[in-house]
Amino acid sequence: MEHHVADSFGHWSEICSRSFVPLLACPRTLTTCADDDFTAHITTRHLGPVRLAHVSSGASRIVRSGRLIAAEPREDVLLSLQIAGAGTVTQGGRQAHLIPSQAALYETDRPYELRFDRPMSEYVVQAPRSLVRIAPAAARRSTAIPVAGRSTTVLRHIVQELLTAEESLDAVQGEMYGHIVLELLADGIRTLDDGEVEGALSGESLVASAQAIMERDSADPQLTIESVARRLGISRRSLEKLFADHGATTPAAHLRRARLRRAERLLVRSDATIAAIGYAAGFSDERTFYRAFRRCHDMPPNEWRTRQGRHHAG
């Protein structure tokens, strides 16, 4: 993750331009003194081509002008999820006035403006439009419209978790979370394009959300497939069918693999006993952990740890 702080609009323009696309940060009104008491900070995390950001700043305007677009064309979509304060997203002749729990979409290949009349905080999701499984015309029809649906609520929780966790993600986790974010982003756009205010998550988004819950909470031995399904408001059988319908492994296999990945990291990074690592990774007892690990790696965890130590030493 990256963290940046700015104490002037010029510096904030540079940081925003590096973090997203070329942008101009300026006072919210012409009469506002340029840098009086202005501060802003941003935390970003990359999930492959998907970027997440937590932005907090004083009152300001963020502008993506036609000139900036011509200088560096980009075809990304962004979703602002308001956390605190209020904001306005303007694009294509529409304005979305956002309060906490609301979100709005905008595109980088057309001029837009973000306006904040007082201190604010928001999450931002940015992704190449080509990776969001939605028709470009549907995305264009959905910009600068406030939305507050299940998909954006789930997305906000996932983004918050990813931006507050200090733990680094391996390549597999990064790719999986990137897929989850893209599915939820597409679901939010479909909700906007269909003119709905609150709608059920699609099957793909339910699978993605279940996978996110398992990855995030796999260390909890009380986490079961039943409890994951319950959080999503569906039955275990329905969740298993959704996984099968969308070409995923079974929910039980996904949860077991998430726990094994956690155990692998602990085996390499700590000197804890095998039993302690099994419990810390979410397994209910040492024997269950031992058997699951051996089935996955064709060797017990203590031998795998020794080999990893030799590999790194070499």
Image: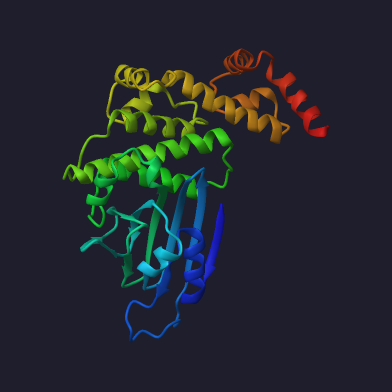
Residue occupying image coordinates x 55% and y 33%: 172
Q: Does residue 63 appear in the picture of this structure?
A: no
Left or right: 299 with respect to 137? right
Which residue is at the far front? 70
In the displayed structure, would residue 147 be above or below residue 183?
below
Q: Quadrant of residue 212?
A: top left
Left or right: 78 with respect to 309? left
In the displayed structure, would residue 289 be above or below residue 34?
above
Which residue is at the far left? 195
Q: Does residue 294 appear in the picture of this structure?
A: yes
Count the numbered circles shown.
0
What percent of the width, then of the height, locates residue 209?
37, 34
What percent of the width, then of the height, locates residue 2?
56, 56
In the displayed structure, would residue 123 be above or below residue 192?
below
In the displayed structure, would residue 162 be above or below residue 221?
below
Residue occupying image coordinates x 40% and y 76%: 26
Q: Considering depth in this image, is 108 or 12 the residue closer to the camera?
A: 108
What percent of the width, then of the height, locates residue 303?
74, 19
Quadrant where the C terminus lies?
A: top right
What percent of the width, then of the height, locates residue 237?
31, 16
Q: Quadrant of residue 206?
A: top left
Q: Coloured how?
A: rainbow
Q: Considering depth in this image, is 227 or 205 the residue closer to the camera?
A: 205
